[in-house]
Amino acid sequence: MTNLDSGPEVTPCRSAAGEGAVAEFLEPREVPLGGLRAMRVERVLPQRVLPTVGAWCFLDQFGPERVEMAVLPHPHTGLQTVTWPLAGEIRHRDSVGSDVLVRPGQLNLMTAGRGISHSEFSVREEEVPVLHALQLWVALPDEALGVEPAFEQHTELPTYEADGVTATVLMGSLGDAVSPATTYTPLLGADLVVEAGARAVLPLRPDFEHAVLVVEGEIEVAGVPVGAGPLLYLGTGRAELEITAGAGARALLLGGEPFPGELVMWWNFVGRGHDEIAQAREEWEHGDRFGHVEGHDGQRIPAPALPGVRLTPRRRG
Ligand code: MN
């Protein structure tokens, strides 16, 4: 999916390590809907006070609602996109030749590296289907910024079972469950299905920072009640995480080593500074760096204008 905002703000990002275990709620914001009128998009990351959780630098939640998705070709650099549908199917086409259906339970991972473009459309049915999806971005570390663009679909993902919690590991590892997806930094992304009456303890890496987003129902995380909507940021320094629930629930657990160095995010690009992003924008408008997505008769999403100021990284805080 694309950043739908037609006038994207500058989002400078910088991580700060080592604040220890915390439990802090961060509210999502509704973003301008751009070409997808009537589509509810809640942006959970980045936050002004928290640009990243590990290398996770972007998290949008779409729906659930009956809506037709029609996102024309648009570019990405410096990141991996993780598309995780909870309901509905999306047709993904990209400039490395992929043309696949993205279905619930399957991990769809696109590595932009030096540059890729893609489109995402609902699958046409008699009735507009319910769409509910999470779209995440993972920032690539310096040494992977220039990797070849690639797309992976993983239909078999490992699970970690605890007492009443089934964690499907999308990226990285949880306990002995290791995702086959390609990662470039130590991180964790897991979908948690929590049964009624669950009382589970998940093993965490204390050097990671973690956060939880509930997408359905309500759970208690480390003794803190969490409902759908806000991101619960948990900080670093936790070797385990207790999760309990009265009724059933579903949640996303994110983690990773605090991202070293600085990031600048603007529109669909993640980079390290203004010039790099300005060049990517220029090459989307007037170059062939991002390849071609078949089937759209040359239609694409044009880049918004750059802001009148230079893009600079900024500390979290
Ligand atoms: Mn996209």
Image (tube, rainbow, N blue to C red):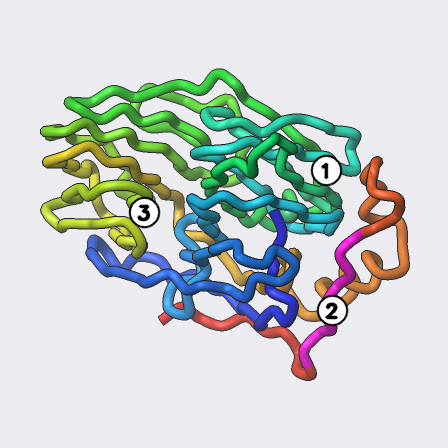
Q: Quadrant of residue 214?
A: top left
- Outermost residue toward the top in this view: 156
Residue 183 image point, x, y percent: 53, 34
Q: Could you say which disc has been placed on residue 290 in the image? A: none
Q: Residue furthest front?
A: 126
Marker count (numbered): 3
The residue segment tinted magenta is: 300-307
**Mark 3 falls on what kind of element?**
strand
Q: Is 80 part of what is drawn in magenta?
A: no
Q: Residue at x 88, y 48 (%)?
A: 298
How many angstroms separate mark 3 from mark 2 (CA)?
Answer: 34 Å
Q: CA distance from mark 3 to mark 1?
A: 29 Å
The kind of residue on which mark 2 rests is Asp
- Residue 205, image x and y in percent? 29, 37
Front position in the image: 123 or 46? 123
Given contact means CB atoms under 8 Å apart, are the residues at marks 3 and 1 in contact? Answer: no
Q: Residue at x 53, y 69 (%)?
A: 12
Please, which residue is most extreme toward the bottom here? Answer: 308
Q: SS class of the residue under badge 1?
A: loop
- Nearer-the-camera pick, 38 or 258: 38
- Amino acid type of disc 1? Pro
Does any atom of ligand 1 lie closer than 8 Å to the CB of label 3? Answer: no
Task: Measure the C-alpha gap from mark 2 to mark 1.
Answer: 21 Å
x, y percent for residue 276: 73, 63
The relative height of residue 123 versus residue 115 in the rendered view (above or below) is above
| Label 1 neighbour load within 10 Å: few <14, some 14-19, many 20+ | many
Kindly identify the residue that appears in the image at 22 percent across and 49 percent down: 227
Residues at discs 2 and 1 in contact (Cβ within 8 Å) = no
**Which residue is label 3 attached to?**
213
Disc sitting over residue 149 in the figure = 1
> Which percent across, then down, holds residue 21?
20, 53
Q: Which residue is mark 2?
A: 275
